[in-house]
Image (cartoon, rainbow, N blue to C red):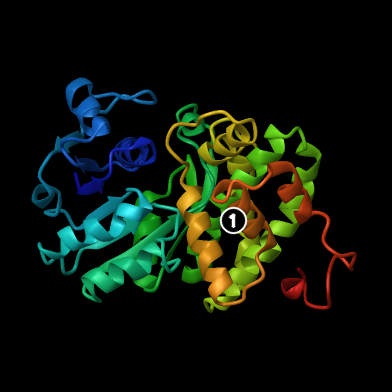
Amino acid sequence: MARISLIGCGRWGTFLGWYAANYCGFDVDMYDIPSSPNFIELRDTRKNAYLTLSDNMTMHDNLAAILQNGTIIVSVGCQYFRGLCKELAAFSPNGKTFLLAMKGLEEPGATTMYDIMRQELGKEVHIGVLSGPGHVQDYMKGVPSCAVIDSDDEATKDRLIKMFSSELIRFYYGDDLIGNQIGAALKNVIGIAAGILDGLNWYGLKGALMARAPIEVGRFIKYFGGNPQTAYGLSHLGDYEATLFSQYSHNRTFGEKFARGEDFGKPAEGVPTLKAVKEFADAHQIDMPICQALYKSVYEHADIKSTIKQIFERGLKHEFDNNINEAC
């Protein structure tokens, strides 16, 4: 049986390893920092709060060991990814294929995970990115979903999709590497906004948020050279149910607790992405009213009600201009 590797034993990463082992027929070698609580729990008990490791899943505390395999799924915190890439570079992993399963942008600079890996490892590795909806809790109940895999190389994309497609997850072929990454990252930011509306009991405005946010996100995608229509695909709008409504969404829950003045613990994934997007948008004069209002609330501690209300009280105007992607 073929072997693949996984780096990152958090909730999502561990599920992807379990999925590859149980739905796709791979033996899976798993790695995380040996001092990580997630790694220790899986090593000692072979389970976490969501699943139990199958017999064809092996834990390793040595990064070199899992680089023996040709395909490696990566699911680590986006702000730590560059450091991991520097570690990987020391092993010269030329010819390896990495499937990046993180959804965020590095701060400062709003750098995508693909660009980070290319900067640190060069052109001698193959890279795919995974985006789209889905929660571990739902998948473990057998609830099917769809997602998208994209790459700068058609052969890599095709191979990864054929490797990991199953009756549980149908993977679509992405055709906008930039847009799919940005769309996936910013859906976490919009999830925070949705949670704040829930926390304020303004959930009636979530429909307006869903209508306006893809336009704003499309504007950001377009600045980087992607297709603004990608904001309406699986990586962004297609992920709204899982991110803006689900009880399992960390970003929505963070926003709800934040609006209520309750402690969430550690910040959700969308918090550093929000900062990266807001600072980049300001520096390059990109109109991002939702992100700018969220930033004022989350980072500058502005009054939540009045700040969020301003998003929906901008000057009277038509809903759409002649070009939907230029509406604001």
Q: Quadrant of residue 265?
A: top left
Is 225 left, or right, of 38 in this rendering? right
Choose top left, top right, bottom left or bottom right for residue 11: top left
Residue drawn at the location 55% of the way across and 60% of the way down: 183
Residue name at image x 19 percent, y 58 percent: 70
Camera-side residue of 182 and 291: 291
What is the tally of numbered marks visible in this picture?
Answer: 1
Q: The residue under label 1 is which amino acid type?
A: His
Q: In this rendering, is residue 15 above or below 130?
A: above
Residue 62 position (above or below residue 286):
above
Q: Which residue in the protein does label 1 denote?
A: 236
The answer to whether one can see residue 144 in this image is: yes
Q: Residue at x 74, y 58 (%)?
A: 212
Viewer can see residue 158: no
- 157 sits to left or right of 279: left
> In what element is the residue under mark 1?
loop
Quadrant of the rendering where the C terminus is positioned: bottom right
Q: Position of residue 205 (x, y in %)?
A: 79, 44
Q: Residue pushed farthest top? A: 45
